[in-house]
Amino acid sequence: LDSINIESIGIQDKADGGFGPGLWDDTSRTELESLLSLLPTSVQSVASHNLMKRLLISSSPVPTKTKNSKNLLEIRLQKLAELGEFSHFGNLLSAIPESSRTKTMRKIQGEVLFMERDIESACSMASIEVQETSSPFWQKALCICQAISGNLDEALFSLEVLRELLGPKDVGFLELMSVLLGQMPTTTLALEPNALNLVLVIENGLAMPDQWISEGGPAIQRSIALTDTVPLMTRLTAGERAAKMGALDPSELARIYQKIVFEHFLFFRKFICNLDGFLMVPSTKN
């Protein structure tokens, strides 16, 4: 399939609103790889977000790769995931033949599944991938899945193995797992905003780190906004930021607002009912 340039695959052509077939004319392979890799996904602009999305999903011939070339499909999928364009990510991945999907693509797919809160699919994938690769990502993912599913002995064993394998940059994950398994009450570390840490923060019922809310990218913000177990005001703050970055449709943000209005209505109604009951209690004084 590489002989017909699989990297030209997209899910939109010019007739569907994508860019035309001459998109990368007169662009060298090195320039193209650099330009795509440097796309700034955390922009406060819906128009810029949509332009990048359109660029990443367009079908267009690309310069021929060389021995040292990067995989353009990996770069495009990674950028779509970072943009919080999970649906378009899935559509582009589905257009890539199974035989052309790389370990990196499958890792990004796992991250997206976790951020979409499709835990069942993510864990099913993790159980398969740990048998195919020694990637720390999938080993960490499996440990999370074992804990969530209640297999605590297996999760504890996996965590001890990971302590020997992981380095200083993974200390946040290790502490979050320790909290989930009851070895620590909480963590005060500054946590990296990534898919696995996000799952652990949610599963532990911890408050979202302030830095994630103020500086997190569109993918993290979208995931927080659409997670039902996160407090509504936190969801709203994340949702507003995600909407400004183009990662959340206004209708999705509106539904969060509606939940807040409804919750306040229920509280007010309960307060009135309690107040009525109090006022209707007969006085015992003469």
Image (spheres, grey):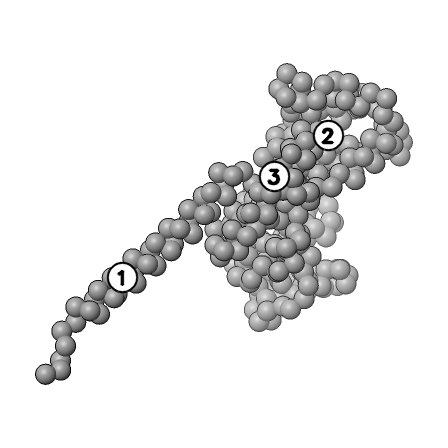
Question: Residue at coordinates 42% horizontally, 46% vertically from top-left?
Answer: 258
The percent coordinates of residue 107 (x first, y second) are 69, 43
Label 2 vs label 1, nearer the camera: 1
Indicate which disc residue 272 carries: 1
Q: Which callout, 1 or 3, points at the residue further toward the start of the chain? A: 3
Indicate which disc residue 246 carries: 3
Q: Which callout, 2 or 3, points at the residue further toward the start of the chain? A: 2
Q: Are marks 2 and 1 in contact (CB under 8 Å)?
A: no
- The outermost residue toward the bottom is 286
- In the displayed structure, does residue 256 sit left or right of residue 241? left
Question: Residue at coordinates 61% horizontally, 60% vertically from top-left?
Answer: 209
Question: Residue at coordinates 71% horizontally, 63% vertically from top-left?
Answer: 171
Residue under pointer 2: 100
Q: Are marks 1 and 3 in contact (CB under 8 Å)?
A: no
What kind of element bears circle 2?
helix
- Mark 3 residue type: Gly
- In the displayed structure, does residue 281 sit left or right of residue 112? left
- Mark 1 residue type: Ile
The picture quadrant where one finds residue 34 is: top right
Relative to 70, is 148 above or below? below
Can I make out residue 98 in this image?
Answer: no
